[in-house]
Image (tube, rainbow, N blue to C red):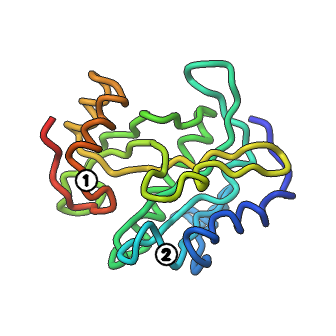
């Protein structure tokens, strides 16, 4: 994993804030109080008036390896959550996934699922996270072109165990076709499983 310079951080922050509003909170240590090699930040807005965006900041300083090619990828992770959700929940999920990514040195590609590993929030059917393009946000948000090259923004969508199994058996394209057809609220951490 090759560290990348800090020179593009201000531009990356501006890229996020143009779409999601100003940063209102940040987490730079893990639950044990150990400083992380990236931050998780919360924004004032999200994809609509009822959602809030959370993202990693600094994960893209590390070049990650694609699991399907020899390409290196730099990315940040995005989550969209309901406005009323306790911020520590989405922030903690982002911390867990970002730490996993740095440990494995593997980028999250479109169609990758993390989990299942138990309910993401208490009482929810959603047990895994699915990486995809941030389709709830204008398309120019998906990539930041900075001084050190492109940074992809991977949206982590909460999904059920059955949906994760469907992705594994039928592929991401079929799953995203089902998302378009059934149009579930992908910001809702308490939504029910799609009919697959």
Q: Identify the mark at residue 45; answer none if there is no mark.
A: 2
Name above or below for residue 188 compared with residue 135.
below
In the rendering, at what x and y percent does residue 112 appear? 43, 34
- Which quadrant would residue 15 be assigned to in this image? bottom right
Crowd class of label 1 (few under 14; some 14 to 19; many from 20; radius 10 Å): some
In the rendering, at what x and y percent does residue 133 appear? 49, 45
Question: Is residue 108 toward the left or the right of residue 111 in the image?
Answer: right
Crowd class of label 2 (few under 14; some 14 to 19; many from 20; radius 10 Å): many
Q: Nearer the viewer, residue 10 or 142?
A: 142
In the rendering, at what x and y percent does residue 56 appear? 59, 58
Question: Is residue 137 toward the left or the right of residue 58 in the image?
Answer: left
Residue at 33% from the left image edge and 51% from the top image edge: 158
Residue at 31% from the left image edge and 44% from the top image edge: 117
Question: Is residue 9 toward the left or the right of residue 19 in the image?
Answer: right
In the rendering, at what x and y percent does residue 53 appear? 48, 67
Residue at 61% from the left image edge and 27% from the top image edge: 66
Residue at 12% from the left image edge and 40% from the top image edge: 195
Residue farthest to the top, as pictured? 69
Residue farthest to the left, as pictured? 195
What residue is disc 1 on? 119
* Disc 1, SS: loop
Q: Earlier in the sequence, mark 1 or mark 2?
A: 2
Question: Is residue 80 toward the left or the right of residue 166 in the image?
Answer: right
* Disc 2, SS: loop
Q: How many marks?
A: 2
Q: Nearer the viewer, residue 118 or 53?
A: 53
Q: Quadrant of the C terminus?
A: top left
Name above or below for residue 38 compared with residue 169.
below
CA gap between label 1 and label 2 equals 25 Å
Q: Identify the mark at residue 143; answer none if there is no mark.
A: none
């Amino acid at each position: 994993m090759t560290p990348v310079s800090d020179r593009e951080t201000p531009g990356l922050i501006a890229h996020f804030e143009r779409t999601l509003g100003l940063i209102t909170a940040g987490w730079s240590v893990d639950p044990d109080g150990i400083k992380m090699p990236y931050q998780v930040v919360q924004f004032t807005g999200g994809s609509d008036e009822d959602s809030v965006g959370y993202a990693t900041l600094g994960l893209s300083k590390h070049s990650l390896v694609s699991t399907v090619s020899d390409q290196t990828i730099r990315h940040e992770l995005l989550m969209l959550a309901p406005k009323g959700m306790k911020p520590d929940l989405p922030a903690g999920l982002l911390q867990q996934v970002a730490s996993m990514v740095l440990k494995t040195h593997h980028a999250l590609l479109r169609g990758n699922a993390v989990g299942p590993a138990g309910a993401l929030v208490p009482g929810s059917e959603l047990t895994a996270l699915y990486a995809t393009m941030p389709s709830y946000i204008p398309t120019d948000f998906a990539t930041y072109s900075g001084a050190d090259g492109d940074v992809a923004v991977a949206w982590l969508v909460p999904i059920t165990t059955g949906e994760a199994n469907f992705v594994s058996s039928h592929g991401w394209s079929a799953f995203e076709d089902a998302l378009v057809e059934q149009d579930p609220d992908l910001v809702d951490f308490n939504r029910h499983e799609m009919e697959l």
